[in-house]
Amino acid sequence: MFRIAIITALAAATVLVFPASSTTAQEALPPAVETTAVEVLLVDGETGTILYQKNPAEPFPPASLAKIMTMEIVFAALRAGEISLETTFPVSEHAWRTGGAPSGTSTMFAALNSQVPVADLIRGTIVQAANDAAIILAEGMEGSEAAFAARMNERAAELGLNNSRFVNPTGLPAEGQQVTVTDLVKLARHLRASYPELYTIYAEPSFEWNKIFQRNRNPLLSAGIGADGLGTGYTDASGYALLGVTEQDGRVTFLAMSGLESERERAAEATKLLRWAHDSFEQVQLFDAGAMIGSASVFGGTAGWVPAVAETPVTVLLPVEAGERVRARIRYEGPLIAPVAKGDPVAALDVLVDGEPVLSQQLVAGNDSSAGSFTDRALGAAKELAFGWVRAF
């Protein structure tokens, strides 16, 4: 059991304390983990719990990880019927020179002026991190890399990738191109959940085109930790990067990291973090669906407050024997203004470990508070003037 104090933005709200663990906070400290990566985000796939983070909002050049956004555009186009796996696109001289055999970069060696099916271009882009494949797809779908990049940015905004910007479909160095580990994990979770059949290509061990056999560049696939995606990248500016997904014992974990100094270090640090995540955490259900977690004051209503309840079970991945290191808080802009209907979003519950938020979940009103009479509103206004309100930040 965990002792979890619920603190709130308003003094009037209920405070709940759960039975204490017999293990003290100092005794409960799990083995520490450190990494040489500059930017890291490690997230539990089911609950969304942040297991480890380091500079999660710091932008860096994506390198080949930009191709994951490229694949989102292609997968969405396949689902919409805009293209099919049998659609063929021509290999232009630009695609051939910029990303093909003459480029000296990752390539599927597509022959100049040949026609390549979308199914093979997808495998070239994913398995071989092929720049020519990504450019061929971009030109075939939108006419140019620039037009395709505009589509990437529009879609990124729709997906809430707020700190990412794409200039080309390959990730080849370009001014202004950037991602964050937070956005990469968000993209990976979306891709895996939304396109399960196509996502399986990320785990394919190899691909051959034009009689040239190449192995998948993701080092996690052979690490024996249940990896099924996604990709790697490298730039002189940001070093070696990786976006990985593992599934072990029914638990899915997402890892994005950047700033490593070598391929070997990238593989070792990623494997270490993912194994630590698997071994050092346990899933805990803190509240049932419908449980009242706190309360929120209401201005001008027939009821002066409404219960803040969990719409769905509150489940979080916590360090083994975390004990008193775990806390929670309720955040809302108060007071709420009547009318408030049962089921309306009214607050957010944050779960914190060592003072750092690891999970945030919406809370809803457990009851109605209809707009009150003139007297109710007058009393509410008097209370506002007399006492003021402490508001969340």
Image: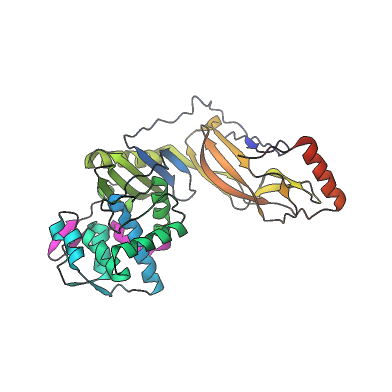
| Residue 213 shown in magenta | yes
Magenta-drawn segment: 194-217
- Image quarter in which the C terminus is found: top right
Q: Position of residue 243 (x, y in %)?
A: 33, 49
Q: Nearer the viewer, residue 233 or 35?
A: 233
Residue at x-position 79% and y-position 39%: 385
Left or right: 317, with 216 as reference point: right
Q: How many marks?
A: 0
Q: Position of residue 50 (x, y in %)?
A: 46, 42
- Image quarter in which the N terminus is found: top right
Residue at x-position 42% and y-position 37%: 280
Residue at x-position 42% and y-position 39%: 53
Left or right: 310, with 257 as reference point: right
| Residue 266 shown in magenta | no
Q: Nearer the viewer, residue 302 or 48?
A: 302
Left or right: 16, with 265 as reference point: right
Quadrant in which residue 262 is drawn: top left
Q: How is the image coloured?
A: rainbow
Compared to 28, does 241 lie above or below? below
Q: Position of residue 85 (x, y in %)?
A: 30, 72
Compared to 86, does 160 lie above or below? above
Tell me if residue 1 can be seen: no
Compared to 65, does 210 lie above or below? below
Tell me if residue 263 can be seen: yes
Q: Position of residue 114 (x, y in %)?
A: 17, 72
Q: Residue furthest front?
A: 175
Q: Nearer the viewer, residue 390 or 117?
A: 390
Quadrant in which residue 368 is drawn: bottom right
